[in-house]
Amino acid sequence: MAVFETAFGPGWRTVRLRAPYPLPGGGYAWWIPQADGRPDPRMVQESLRALRGRIEELLQQEARGAPHRVVVGFSQGGAMAALLTLQTPDLVTGLAIFSGFLPDVPEAGVAPSLAGKAVFIAHGRADSLVPIAQARALCARLQALGARTTCVEYPGGHKASAEAWRAFREWIRGLG
């Protein structure tokens, strides 16, 4: 989502990675839900491998010592960002999730600690696609792993509200 780029100030390099699976009505997804609505674990793992590989490739092109490597995602993108951070925390210094969740798939190689990782989670209390309880559970899980979490709830639904954007920009400035 190009809109994320507006939150970062000078000195940040942003890279948008597109999900691999085209949707019939337009757009893309990191996985196609199964008949029961749950993510297809095989598709999630394939997408995660591709995402990890692309980020590793980008990091090889950049100075590895870049002070901030924040992965940001909305909805399924937030879910993928969360899985990436849980499985390979050394790739990122921070994680930001809008209207996201942790997908119900078997996790392989989850890090025992996220100590020091900066995490921002924003979620609408009226989200009918991803219930707020999922965001709260993700926030609690990341806190339990030692992440420095900022969890923001707002009155809206499955979108990033103006309140969420203000909180995100403040969080980003705090990283600098």
Image (tube, grey):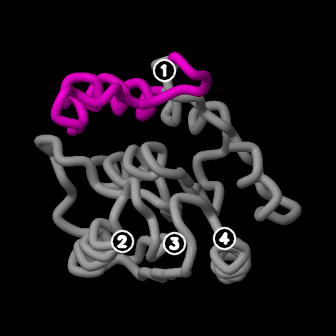
Q: Earlier in the sequence, mark 2 or mark 3?
A: 3
Mark 4–mark 3 Cα distance, whole angstroms, equals 9 Å
Which mark is on residue 169?
none
Which is closer to the viewer, label 2 or label 1? 2
Q: From this view, report whether residue 73 is shown above or below residue 142.
A: above
Q: Are marks 4 and 3 in contact (CB under 8 Å)?
A: yes
Residue at the spot of label 3: 122
Number of other residues with Cα within 10 Å of mark 1, as a class: few under 14, some 14 to 19, many 20 or more: some
User: Looking at the picture, which amino acid does disc 1 mark?
Assistant: Pro
**Percent x, y of residue 74:** 53, 51
Mark 2–mark 1 Cα distance, whole angstroms, equals 27 Å
Which quadrant: the N terminus?
A: top right
Residue at the spot of label 4: 161
- Does the magenta portion include 26? yes
Residue at the spot of label 2: 132
In the drawing, does residue 139 fall left or right of residue 152? left
Q: Earlier in the sequence, mark 3 or mark 1?
A: 1
